[in-house]
Image (tube, rainbow, N blue to C red):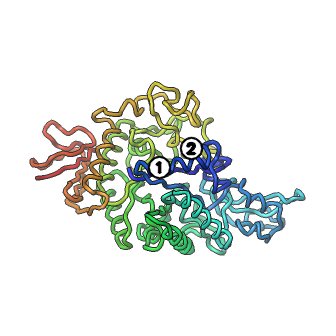
Amino acid sequence: MDAVWLSPFYPSPQADAGYDVADYRDVDPLFGSLADADKLIAEARSRGLRVIVDLVPNHTSSAHRWFQEALPTPPGSPERSRYIFRDGLGPDGEQPPNDWQSVFGGPAWTRTVDPDGQPGQWYLHLFDTGQPDLNWDNPEVHAEFLDVLRFWLDRGVDGFRVDVAHGLVKQADLADWQEPQEILSGNEIDKPRPPMWDQEGVHEIYRQWRQVLDSYPGERVLVAEAWVEPAERLARYVRSDEMHQAFNFEYLLAAWTAPAQYAVITRSLEATDSVGAPTTWVLSNHDVVRHASRLGLAIGGGRPNGIGIGDPQPDAALGLRRARAATLLMLALPGSAYLYQGEELGLPEHTTLPDEARQDPTWARTGHTQRGRDGCRVPIPWEADAPSYGFGPTDASWLPQPSLWAEYALDRQRDVPGSTYELYRTALRLRRAHGLGRGTLEWLSSGDEVLTFRNGELTVLTNFGETPVPVPTDAEVLASSAPLEDDGAVPTDVTVWLRTA
């Protein structure tokens, strides 16, 4: 491993798992202190690990000092200009300023109450009501985040994963947008760009940020969380004077078929190559159903926003088999690979999480129609027989863990041949030893059922079909996502890494 990316640890009311930041220059007592952060950074560096922290610049918490200062002030005040406040429509301003919807469900506007108790202006929140959007037309907002960058860079962090990187700038007229706001999706390729996403102004912001990072010694990184399609448009975020990398969500969402995988891999590499940036590869994160469960659903059946009691359940064995094959395919690709905590254990989604335990604001804001992201955020199992599987001293954990997770615990998999944990360790060791991340992909076959490519001296084959595929007789199998046939052929939903003489 090269780096650790930490999701938000700042002081927060936790309306959205810490993505509602009340203070960008401190650590929430839930997690420790600034001194603890300094120690973590120093100890990570002593082990050869970089530390990337999550930066949330699209919105603050409603508990942030700036927003609290804005509420008692009149319309047009300097305090309100840090956010997006607008008068409502209708005779008494009782209607929201436009028809935008929150990606968590419900309106993207909430009306305030003036100090005299009368209804006031509305403020924009593309996410939860506790996450008011900042106004990036205000120079004070720009200056604030440049200072926040320096604060953490001075403490030794190696870079930032930028939340909602495509959302900071809004179309000036805040025009109505009739399309629904999906919780996590790129722009529809054949439709106009939404007025709240991927506006041209975001690029100047990141050029300024890049200058700050480049002024520090060593290598620092900016990574965009930008749900932007097509790949050619996402590549604009990683031009030479902007960000270094952008998460490849089109790849994450691609169907588990040979044609779909070939198309997205080819398109991704061509787009980033055109701007001289590395491609990224990711299969799971804290916002989507874990791929060990997602790949156990019917192909082409859509991507659920959470899975819960009463929903169609994934085929756990099929999902893990495909997940291991997908991981081995991904880790052989040139570029940067991002792993989500727990996937190295083959951890599935918690698909039977009690609804009363759910914390994702999506669950409430969609009227209990979308279960949201809690199922992939459950604390991972370290020790099979320990309280809360080693997460803490008791069985209490911030989201309840399923009883079947004992079999996935780290202490049940470490040094066990064939375990998912050992598969990841082997693949990561070979990936580094063979320089796959800095390699070049050469397609050898791209049919309807089999993909084969070469990266350096390794040949990678994934069988998506039902018929086992033979490998060259002179090939040495370096890694396989599942056992091969008795005759050495590659079964369905299996990836192998081969070295030929």
* Amino acid at dot 2: Arg
Mark 1 residue element: loop
Q: Nearer the viewer, residue 95 or 398?
A: 398
Q: Nearer the viewer, residue 54 or 165?
A: 54
Q: Nearer the viewer, residue 150 or 114?
A: 150
Mark 2 residue element: loop
Label 2 or label 1, whichever lies nearer to me, is 1
Mark 1 Cα shell of 10 Å, populated few (<14), some (14-19), many (≥20): some
In the drawing, does residue 355 fall left or right of residue 68?
left
Q: Quadrant of residue 176?
A: bottom right
Residue 91 x %, y %: 83, 67
Visible in this render: residue 301?
Answer: no
Q: Residue at x 33, y 53 (%)?
A: 330
In the drawing, does residue 297 fall left or right of residue 16?
left
Circle 1 residue: 285
Visible in this render: residue 9?
Answer: yes
Q: CA distance from mark 2 to mark 1?
A: 16 Å
> Residue lying farthest top?
385
In the rendered image, the vertical position of residue 124 relative to residue 208, given as above or below: above
In the rendered image, the vertical position of residue 380 relative to residue 160, given as above or below: above
Circle 2 residue: 371
Q: Nearer the viewer, residue 110 or 300?
A: 110
Residue 16 x %, y %: 62, 49
In the rendered image, the vertical position of residue 135 relative to residue 332, given as above or below: below
In the drawing, does residue 446 fall left or right of residue 343?
left
Q: Quadrant of residue 407?
A: top left
Residue 123 x %, y %: 73, 62
